[in-house]
């Protein structure tokens, strides 16, 4: 799968989510488990659900009990998102395992999967900014501002896609190499979060 195809896949996920537009909708991943496409679809689905959970929790009239439940769900979603990003990086590590880096090979500031993570979020930003730029019940000023932001987001996607393509080409040629550090999130680990281990929970 070429990097330039990522955007089409992410746009499909966003459209699939909005066909139900429900945070509890079932993820019907059409791709074969273990493939890059499967991981990318799963990643963007998590992002889509979490995007809308973040909207819901900002309702000023939300019941505090419901808000806490959603916050816990967002925490789990963030962990799932991180896990899938690391699975994507593992896929690329396996893909490039036989590439011998050049003597002067450099490491990138972020791995392919974390760059792709930003591309997935951009698909959601573009979709929702397009909705705002198309509203007939909003002011002309609102539509104008959102249209300007939409143009910036689309250019950002072009630039980021190009950068990801170049990064993958550089890794494939040996001019850059991958090194993956696990996130090691401490607040989710009962043995590392002092609030959890001091309370015995």
Image (cartoon, grey):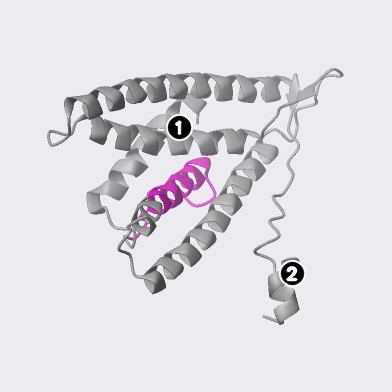
Q: Residue furthest right?
A: 103
**Dot placed on the residue nearer the N-terminal end, 2 or 1:** 1
- Residue bearing mark 1: 6
At 54% across and 51% down in the image, what residue appears?
81
Q: Position of residue 32 (x, y in %)?
A: 46, 49
At 29% across and 27% down in the image, what residue appears?
146
Q: Position of residue 88 (x, y in %)?
A: 59, 43
Examine the residues drawn in magenta and state their main secondary structure: helix
Q: Quadrant of residue 197?
A: bottom right
Q: Position of residue 3 (x, y in %)?
A: 51, 27
Q: Which mark is residue 150?
A: none
Please determine whether, in this image, residue 31 is positioned above or below residue 132.
below
At 27% across and 31% down in the image, what residue appears?
130
Q: Quadrant of residue 116?
A: top right
For this view, does 35 lie left or right of residue 70?
A: right
Judging depth in this view, the residue of 7 and 139 nearest the camera is 139
Q: Position of residue 200 (x, y in %)?
A: 71, 82
- Residue bearing mark 2: 194
């Amino acid at each position: 799968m070429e990097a330039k195809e990522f955007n089409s896949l992410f746009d499909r996920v966003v459209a699939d989510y909005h066909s139900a537009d429900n945070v509890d909708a079932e993820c019907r991943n059409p791709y074969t488990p273990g493939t890059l496409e499967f991981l990318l679809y799963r990643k963007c689905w998590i992002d889509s659900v979490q995007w809308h959970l973040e909207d819901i929790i900002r309702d000023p009239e939300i019941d505090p009990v419901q808000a806490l439940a959603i916050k816990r769900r967002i925490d789990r979603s963030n962990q799932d998102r991180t896990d899938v990003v690391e699975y994507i990086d593992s896929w690329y590590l396996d893909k490039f395992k036989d590439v011998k880096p050049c003597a002067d090979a450099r490491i990138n500031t972020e791995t392919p999967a974390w760059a792709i993570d930003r591309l997935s979020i951009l698909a959601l930003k573009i979709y929702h900014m397009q909705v705002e730029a198309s509203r007939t019940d909003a002011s002309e000023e609102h539509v104008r501002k959102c249209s300007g932001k939409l143009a910036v987001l689309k250019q950002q996607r072009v630039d980021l896609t190009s950068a990801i393509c170049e990064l993958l080409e550089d890794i494939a040629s040996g001019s850059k190499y991958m090194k993956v550090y696990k996130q090691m999130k401490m607040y989710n680990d009962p043995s590392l979060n002092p609030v959890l281990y001091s309370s015995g929970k």
